[in-house]
Image: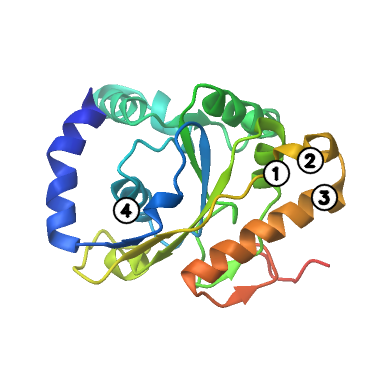
Amino acid sequence: MLYRTLELTLAPALRAVYRPAVTGLHNLPDGPVVLAANHVSFADEIFTPLAARRQVCYFAKVEYFNTPGPRGRAMAVFFNSMGHVPVARSDTRSAAAVIDIGVDVLAEGRTLGIYPEGTRSPDGRLHKFRTGVARLALRSGAPVVPVGLVGTREAQPPGTHAWHRVPVEVHFGAPLYFGDRAGEERSSRVLREVTEIVRASVQALSGQAYVDAFAGSSTTPG
């Protein structure tokens, strides 16, 4: 209900103010789909569903759902209404179950948004993708639509609460299908191969320089 209310009130206002340039909207198929995007700002989770014109589920820290007090309860209601899924990121068992949770979300025919870099880019460049996107694609059979976000870092700079009216672009690429390779999920080579296909597609849309290291890593993995 809250999501629908925001779609009818806040979304039109944001579209009027920012007028995001959207391309490739026709690439979004009906039914379950994984939106794999670059991540440079908190605003990414605002502009992606705004451009897609559909509810997009994201993984969110479990603390957003179980913080005590009135503010915590209000926050839990908000994130639940937005369709976000709680994940205890510090719990390795929960982290390992994230893929299964994502598959369940997709099995319900929903749209799942993920950031394969695993965290927000610290410098605006595109960093090496983790293979969770490949596991999701292989296990669920859902198509992966690469998403390139441009200008969101300037619209809402990391480390600040300020918003700026600047040009924002959201580009949706052609859907990528990997369901026919489901039996190869145990192969680390295949997981990296699929992940790199998604990464290259996102980079082509975002136009970012690429860093062959995970975000936050001080060395370049082999």
Please tell me the numbered disc located at residue 181: 2
Q: Which residue is tagged 4?
A: 47
> Which residue is more in the foreground, 132 or 29?
29
Q: Which residue is tagged 1?
A: 178
Q: CA distance from mark 3 to mark 4?
A: 31 Å
Q: Residue furthest bottom?
A: 209
Please state if 77 lies on the left or on the right of 103 as rendered: left
Please state if 30 lies on the left or on the right of 192 as rendered: left
Q: CA distance from mark 3 to mark 2?
A: 9 Å
Q: CA distance from mark 4 to mark 1?
A: 27 Å
Residue type, label 2: Arg
Q: CA distance from mark 2 to mark 4?
A: 32 Å
Please state if 17 lies on the left or on the right of 177 as rendered: left
Can the viewer see residue 216? no
- Tell which circle, 2 or 4, labels the residue nearer the N-terminal end: 4
- Tell which circle, 3 or 1, labels the residue nearer the N-terminal end: 1
Residue 2, given in percent of the width and then of the height, sits at 22, 27
Q: CA distance from mark 3 to mark 1?
A: 11 Å
